[in-house]
Image (cartoon, rainbow, N blue to C red):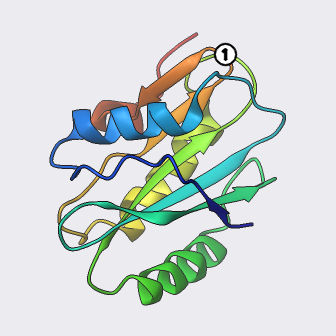
């Protein structure tokens, strides 16, 4: 599924805080029916392109080959730009092991992208960012 947003901000994304603000403007009011992977493309000037790609109903855990094929296809569409990603799902903001697995897969497949953007997580309770320690260590709870 591809979505286009007329109101997508056009200012350059120069920092992680800028990217957070962009995702926050896209998500709007939290509330999700199912798990989704969102892709947004930034041009060479780091401006958001007009197309957002939400991939609805992704599985609980990533299948690395499938994710790799998807991201390679995406990179073919924006060879000179970058891709920013966000996971969304219903439920609490607590990072689940399945969220961590998706973020690890995305991070590893986009590791050589410059600039390198963090993976975000949107839930029914708000928007967050996967920090490096979120990817490395499962937190109790």
Q: In this view, does 48 lie above or below 138?
A: below
- Viewer can see residue 101: yes
Quarter of the image where the C terminus is located: top right
Q: 105 or 138: which is nearer to us?
A: 105
Which quadrant of the view contains residue 78? bottom left
Which quadrant of the view contains residue 63? bottom right
Q: Is residue 29 left or right of residue 11?
A: right
Q: Position of residue 18 (x, y in %)?
A: 25, 38
Q: Please tell me which residue is depicted at 48% across the width and 64% down the height of the picture.
A: 50
Q: 129 or 109: which is nearer to us?
A: 129
Outermost residue to the top: 141
Q: Which residue is the site of mark 1?
A: 92
Helix, strand or loop status at disc 1: loop
Quarter of the image where the N terminus is located: bottom right
Q: Is residue 103 left or right of residue 93?
A: left
Q: Please tell me which residue is depicted at 65% across the width and 22% down the height of the picture.
A: 30
Q: Position of residue 6 (x, y in %)?
A: 54, 53
Q: Is residue 57 above or below residue 89?
A: below
- Viewer can see residue 136: no
């Amino acid at each position: 599924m591809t979505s286009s947003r007329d109101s997508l901000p056009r200012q350059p994304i120069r920092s992680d805080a800028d990217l957070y603000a962009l995702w926050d403007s896209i998500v709007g009011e939290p509330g999700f029916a199912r798990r989704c992977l969102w892709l947004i493309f930034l041009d060479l000037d780091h401006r958001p392109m007009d197309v957002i790609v939400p991939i609805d109903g992704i599985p609980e855990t990533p299948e690395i080959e499938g994710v790799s094929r998807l991201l390679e296809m995406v990179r073919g569409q924006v060879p000179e730009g970058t891709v920013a990603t966000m996971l969304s799902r219903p439920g609490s903001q607590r990072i689940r092991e399945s969220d961590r697995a998706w973020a690890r897969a995305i991070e590893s497949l986009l590791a050589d992208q410059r600039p390198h953007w963090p993976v975000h997580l949107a839930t029914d309770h708000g928007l967050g960012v996967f920090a490096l320690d979120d990817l490395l260590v499962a937190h109790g709870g």
